[in-house]
Image: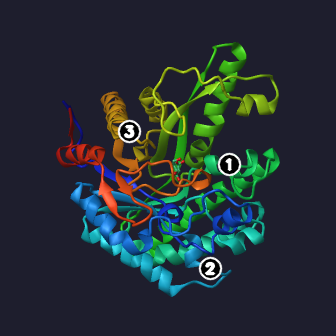
Amino acid sequence: MLEFPKDFFWGAATSAYQVEGNNTNSDWWEWEKRVNLKEVSGSACRHYELYKEDFDLAALLNHNAHRLSIEWSRIEPEEGKFSDQEIKHYRDVILSLKQHNLEAIVTLHHFTNPLWFVKLGGWQNKKAYEYFLRYVEKIVSALCKDVKYWVTINEPMVYVYHAYILGFWPPQEKSFLKANKAKENLLLSHIKSYKLIREIYRKESLNPPLISIAQNVQAFIPCVPTLRNRIAAYLRGKYFNFDFIERLMHAHTLDFIGINYYTRSLVETRGWGLKNLTLDVCNKNHSPLNKNSLGWDIYPQGLYSLLLALKKYGLSIFILENGICTQDDNLRWDFIRGHLKSIHMAMNEGVRITGYIYWSLIDNYEWDKGFSPRFGLIEVDYQTYKRSVRESARQYALVCKTGRLE
Ligand code: BGC
């Protein structure tokens, strides 16, 4: 029997664009139509209207925390024009969380941008942080009384890779130079937002909030342990997992470390070039591990090693996403249990961990992969929008209630 601390946070996450539906002023909305994406987000899960019902279920499942994001393009649909109605909507959402005794963990940027911002160059524009800050000031001022945990930017490196290096997501660039510029602008946006958010709380005479990012970390493992693969795995860990965190630590702008963990990546380089060292992976598909429905290896040991590696920063760590898409709900529960065991082992080694947030509360729109990957603790029927609680959610609910894992 494993015991978790009494004050541990247990919950699940969503992001605005993936669940709300009809985010018509967002860059992703414009892009999915322009490129004729196989599945467009449309009404998504209709969470914009159904959030209270979704929070009822989270509370019923004994969660005591919930992570969500604010859609910038709703708050500021046109440059400099803020929507009072949408600000009120998110105030209502936060109040509803409070009524459900769910601690709100609020993300300010989760991959999508207002279309007007992108038309001005988006994260390539050297004034990007100024635009972002204006929005941050508006929404944080409106919500500060009821929010303690802020996540400025979700997975900055995943965003940079997909949007500026691999070219899978808008604006579909393939340029290390542009990637680096976007990364620097995201860094600056976090640093400036951190200071601004703290200032807002100070002026309102509120206790200081806790602010971080959600950093995606992966276990980079050399497929065959050649010198080149080992060097590449090391460099990827440094660049992809740790660099952003270290830069923010250096600027004293992290109150805790937020991480998202899903899988490992098998490194198999085909040359010494920059592209080889940073991008080549093994595509032989010969790993014996169980996989999620997108083919990602299930590898809880990786979470354990990464937590130990993060210990040196001396901050507490909040697992802000960890989850599996699968049609096999037994595998979902195995996944959760395996990762909770890794977390417990790391805690026994002295790693301070604040809580565990599963991705996701409900099935949702998995970006360019559409609606088929099923990550939810709760199933969504996209014809009727009916929610059905999965068995894995009930097993997780028991852990949330007792703080114990058998
Ligand atoms: C993202 C989510 C996404 C999930 C599963 C994370 O990288 O924050 O938006 O749905 O992983 O791919």
Going from the N terminus, do you reach mark 1 or mark 2 first? 2
Mark 1, mark 3: which one is toward the viewer?
A: 3
Going from the N terminus, do you reach mark 2 or mark 3 first? 2
The image shows residue 304 at horizontal and vertical percentages of 42, 29
Q: What is the crowding at mark 1: few (fewer than 14 residues within 10 Å), some, or many (at least 20)?
A: some
- Position of the N terminus, as image quadrant, is top left
* Relative vertical location of residue 201 with respect to residue 390 in this rendering, above or below: below
For label 2, being within 8 Å of ligand 1 is answered no
> Could you say which quadrant of the image residue 186 lies in?
bottom right
Q: Residue at x 40, y 44 (%)?
A: 316
- Position of the C terminus, as image quadrant, is top left
Q: Which mark is residue 162?
A: 1
Q: Which mark is residue 328?
A: 3
Q: The residue under label 1 is which amino acid type?
A: His
The image shows residue 57 at horizontal and vertical percentages of 27, 61
Going from the N terminus, do you reach mark 1 or mark 3 first? 1
Task: Tell whether 218 sits left or right of 333.
Answer: right
* Relative vertical location of residue 406 with respect to residue 91 in this rendering, above or below: above
Q: Secondary structure at mark 1?
A: helix
Task: Tell whether 208 sits left or right of 40.
Answer: left
Q: Nearer the viewer, residue 225 or 211?
A: 225
Quick check: can you spot residue 67?
Answer: yes
Q: The residue under label 2 is which amino acid type?
A: Pro
- The residue wearing badge 2 is 77
Spatial CA distance of label 2 from label 3 is 40 Å
The image shows residue 359 at horizontal and vertical percentages of 42, 49
Spatial CA distance of label 1 from label 3 is 28 Å
Q: Secondary structure at mark 3?
A: loop
The image shows residue 83 at horizontal and vertical percentages of 55, 84
